[in-house]
Image: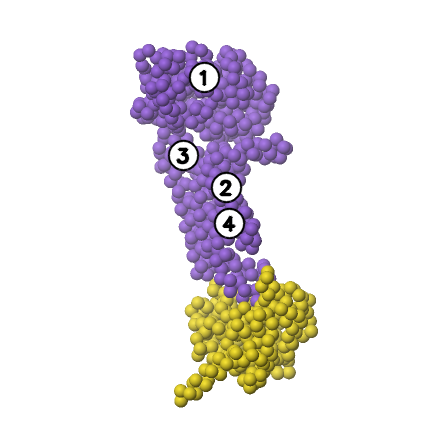
Amino acid sequence: MSQALLDRLLPLVAAHVLLASAALALGLLIALPLGVLAARHRRFGQVAMGAASLVQTIPSLALLALFFPLLLGLRTLGLPLSPLGFLPALLALTLYAVLPIMRNTLVGLQGIDRDVIEAADGLGMTPAQRLRLVEVPLALPTAMAGIRTASVWTIGAATLSTTVGQPSLGDVILSGLQTQNWTLVVAGCVAAAALALIADALLALAERGLALRRRPLWIVALTLFIAAPIAALLLQPRSQATVTIGAKSFAESYILARVIGHRLEAAGYRVRYKENLGSAVVFGAVASGEVDVYVDYAGTIWTNEMRRTAIVPRAAMVAGVADWTRSKRGVTTLGALGFENAYALAMRPRPGIASIADLARAAPGLTMGGDLEFLDRPEWAAIRQTYGLSFARLRSFNPSFMYEALKSGDADVISAFSSDGRIAADGLVVLTDPKGAIPSYDALLLVGPSASRDAKLTAALRPLIGAVPVAMMRRANLMVDRATNKASPDEAARWLARQIVP
Amino acid sequence: MTWSPRTFTKPLVTGNNNRGPAVVLEGVSKAYGAAIALDRVSLDVAAGSFVALVGASGSGKSTLIRTINRLIEPDSGSVSIDGRDLREQPVHQLRRTIGHVIQSVGLFPHMSVAENIAIGLRIAGEAPGKRVAELLDLVDLPQEMADRSPATLSGGQQQRVGVARALATAPGLMLLDEPFGALDPLTRDALARAYRALHERLALTSIMVTHDMAEALLTADRIVVMAAGRIVADATPAALVRGEGGGEAQALVAVPRGHAERLAALR
């Protein structure tokens, strides 16, 4: 393992351990009393178990995502809550940890011989004594099995917290997947699996020590188990003056985040990256100050945030977006970087198809491949309506795999981005849009409310405005996206910076 | 085992001048929905006596004995011990002054024999001192058994531990609910005799539920026969054997008498 990879993994391991431990601890705090209550009151037990099971049926990714609007809503009510990062991740993971612990506590308590309980009562134990001296020791092995399940689940699901901006080993897994860097993916998976196995082994050891009533064994095991998050806490960088740079989940976004980061580091700032944020999440994050600066696209804000459907000329859209973000959300649009990354339809050259209008005639016999986000976007609906497109099949792919799909024939037409280096590299054609159905997508540098008041920060970023030609962006993107001789987003960012700013 | 004692432990053997308490039930009723378990039962148990409650399954004898340590709260009527109503003190305090022995014993599987025996003292905050050793001697168990797990004991040994555990806080009143019902006949006979001897030696008041009339006749001073939630006979063993006590009691006495006659005929 290279030193660079190790340097990247270690803080993520620490953040991962901290998040999973906090969720497990909170889960225990909630689930153990609930399990005892459920054993005492049958009706309550049924309701609590039903609710916990219901939570378990929600996919973990969805549960994490649901906390974002929920916390955002609570925040508008005046509660000082952060809708991104540690809090939503902690809440979602805690909910997941509750069911196995509560169920096993309940089952463990219910499994105690009735005669033993009657003997305890007959001896004159108070309810608290009965719980402490009889019920807890006897239910412990079963409850412990639930705690072990919960800890393994929590450590696994914590990888998903990266989508709400909480660093975890999911960062390298998701980034590796987006840029097809399999070393990163494997490193992240192996590290997460190792954490889960170590946690499970320590708890198994503690369980054994308790069962055999060997005090040193369980004390040592539990001490190690608790020492891990404490060590992780000490490893956390504690600097308040850190600028948070946001990125969505594709190469261009990673690269631009690092171009910004390198400039700010050169200006004396500490920076951290929150990558793989969804389009809807990241704008909310910059408005709320969770993210200080990131690059978004005029058309994305125009349609997603401003809910406009009319298509206006490029310059008017940039001006309209800048005005709206400042007046409605307090977000400063520092300026356009100079290139567009518009949605486009791309395909291998076919005779007679040069525009989307031409495509409409051939579409009933073709398969359209789009990335997960595109097929749900208003732009797609606008293109379809404007040209009357009707494909034989629609398939969704991860953006990284769409070009492969075109090569393998799994798709005939794909949604593409005009700044993607693979269009030229793969010899594809971008279909023209004669009816102007696709809005322009100028890359904009957006700065959050508090960061925009920092004149030194905006001065450090201003040279990027209008400085990135689309050809350069394409080449940088291709360095990361190409199948062989790949560069990391960091390397591509350094290359790009050398080209654009003297 | 570490806990700090708050009080000194009461001596186990107090001498015959300090007898177990008297127990009085007055008009005690208990119903489960439409099923009547106890129907206005009144009973005086004299201090230091050994009363057997006998009857068929569902006659109410188990319900009755459980009202005395409030494992069951009667719907109406009152129970008092030495003239003091049960409800005058917290239920766990009451139960700590009453020994309770049940058919299935209910030893704590995660504790050693010694810890099981000492648990009553532990929850009351008393130091066990030499009490565990004393009790093992009292119920005729070897001292080496102290550190064993209850699961390694025979059924008879387990019930001896159960009796020792019930006696640990030196209660004056013992409630025994089918105490020897799950044991083989030899062990059962030996334990019943051993318990009777303890009753004498510790000057206890004992109330024992059993469905076995022979065991009742040979162990108790007084036999109370129950049927359908009521007391239908109340007599000494000698009187029952003489044919007194009425039809329901005599039907129960007929069983061991028949056994005895058939055994005599075999000679």
Give the chain letter at badge 3.
A
Q: Is residue B159 left or right of residue B17?
A: left
Whether labels 3 and 1 belong to a single chain: the reply is yes
First-in-chain label (4 vs 1): 4
Numbered mark located on residue A173 in the image: 3
Q: Which chain is yellow?
A: B
Image spot of residue A420 (x, y percent): 39, 20
Whether labels 1 and 2 belong to a single chain: the reply is yes
Check disc 1 and give the amino acid type: Gln
Whether labels 2 and 4 belong to a single chain: the reply is yes
First-in-chain label (2 vs 4): 2
**Separation (CA) of disc 1 from disc 2:** 39 Å
First-in-chain label (1 vs 2): 2
Mark 1 = which residue? Answer: A385
Image spot of residue A466 (x, y percent): 48, 14
Camera-side residue: A263 or A416?
A416
Q: Are marks 2 and 4 in contact (CB under 8 Å)?
A: no
Check disc 4 and give the amino acid type: Met
First-in-chain label (3 vs 4): 4
Q: Quarter-wise, where is residue B177 in the image?
A: bottom right
Q: Is residue A290 left or right of residue A396?
A: right
Neighbours of disc 2 within 10 Å: few (<14), some (14-19), many (20+) = some
